[in-house]
Amino acid sequence: MKIQKTTAAILVLGAFAGAAHAQSVTLYGIADGGFLFNNNVKGEKLYGLSSATSSRWGLLGSEDLGGGLKAIFDLENGFTLGTGALSQGGLEFGRRAYVGLQSATYGTVTLGRQYSASNDATSNFASGADWAASGLGYGTRAGDVDNVDTSNRVQNAIKYTSPSYRGLTVGVLYSLGGQAGDFSRNEVTDAAVSYVNGPVKLGASYMFTKDPYYATFGDQGNSSSPTSATGGTNNMASRIYGGYASAGSQQIITAGGSYALGAATLAVLYSNTQFQNLGTVNAVGSYGTKYNGGTATFNSGELNVKYALTPALTLAGAYIYTHNSGADDVGSASYNQFNLGTIYQLSKRTSLYAIGFFETASGVDSTGKKAVADFSTSSYSSNNHQLAAIVGMTHKF
């Protein structure tokens, strides 16, 4: 009897040990703080604390279901280090919140608030999403109009990512609008392909969004009232494209690539963003109420380079050009931006950085007024140029 009890105890402990081994949960995050200077925020100088990389913490989990299948989840919170406030419009897990199944043979399916498949395939080629202050947002193409730097996530999304086959990966995403009686309202359709072969990386994507004022901007998404669509930090307040808030749809086509040559990595990125069917959406409180039909088109190109001067010290630079062709006979606008940065690794997890940004604008912007410089997430300049810099540190855990 004693032997039987001992054996039973061992079996019970073994079962618990097996369960613990089969499931894992990882706490991870980034704490980033820096001193920010902007020479012209509506005519005034700005000094303050900000972040080059978005501060965050998250829980990443997986459970082995057997047969090569895993259950996975990721809950990721964004916060402002200087104040402790929630980012992404105050959402608790505004950066990511999804659950799904993963198979090495068949790929991964996830449900929830997620990065787009387009972002997975092309963001690595953008300086703003890589080293040029992705959290601050200043380093993006004009206003992050193509969303390569994920100013906006996709909510209520079903996403599939294929396994890599000889370096080729395909991703597709569909976001349900969630509006009773109108299945297609606020929907998002997204597809992307990427290729990796040694030093060569390539990516291309297509994204189509119905009613972008509600479905995309303002962090809440899938809304039927403009209050939540304008309640977040990533709303359509940008002078660069805020005048197109009444667009019935938005189309984004992106393609890019990079090549690693010794200590240097060269990258290029092109995007075409269209705000279509202007005047369709009742975008209350926005600039974009005067357009009656038509399409506004942004073409953006970026060239950037990173160079590892030493194993610890990296130097980087980028040039970005964006042209807005305008709509309804309202004149066009052009934006030129330069990013320059350096990152020094104190350790594998801790680094120091210094990054500078300069943008110029010309022509007539989306509001029908003389174009002004307008860094993404910043208030616009009082004139056609804007200069900013941030110096700080990043710690990953």
Image (cartoon, rainbow, N blue to C red):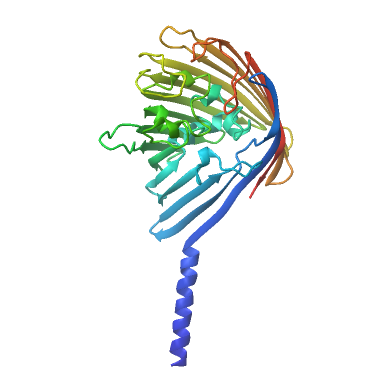
Give me the residue at 41% from left, 30% from top: 226
The image position of residue 304, as x and y in percent, is 61, 25
Front-most of residues 162 and 16:
16
- The residue at 55%/33% (across/down) is 124
Left or right of 109? Residue 232 is right
Please provide percent x and percent y for residue 129. 57, 32
State the image quarter where residue 113 is shown.
Answer: top left
**For this view, does 83 lie left or right of residue 324?**
right
Along the viewing direction, whichever of 314 and 223 lies nearer the viewer: 223
Q: Is the N terminus in the top left, top right, bottom left or bottom right quadrant? A: bottom left
Q: Is residue 50 visible?
A: yes
Residue 343 shows in the view = no
Closest to the observer, 96 or 305? 96
Q: Is residue 395 above or below residue 181?
A: below
Which residue shows up at 40% across the image and 37% down it?
171
Tell me where residue 315 appears, x and y as whole percent: 70, 30
Residue 287 position, x and y percent, is: 47, 19
Question: From the viewer's perspective, is residue 201 above or below residue 359?
Answer: below
Query: Residue reaching furthest left?
Result: 181
Q: Quarter-wise, where is residue 41 in the image? A: top right
- At x 60%, y 17%, the residue is 373
Q: Quadrant of residue 375?
A: top right
Q: Would residue 352 appear left or right of 113 to someone viewing this image?
A: right
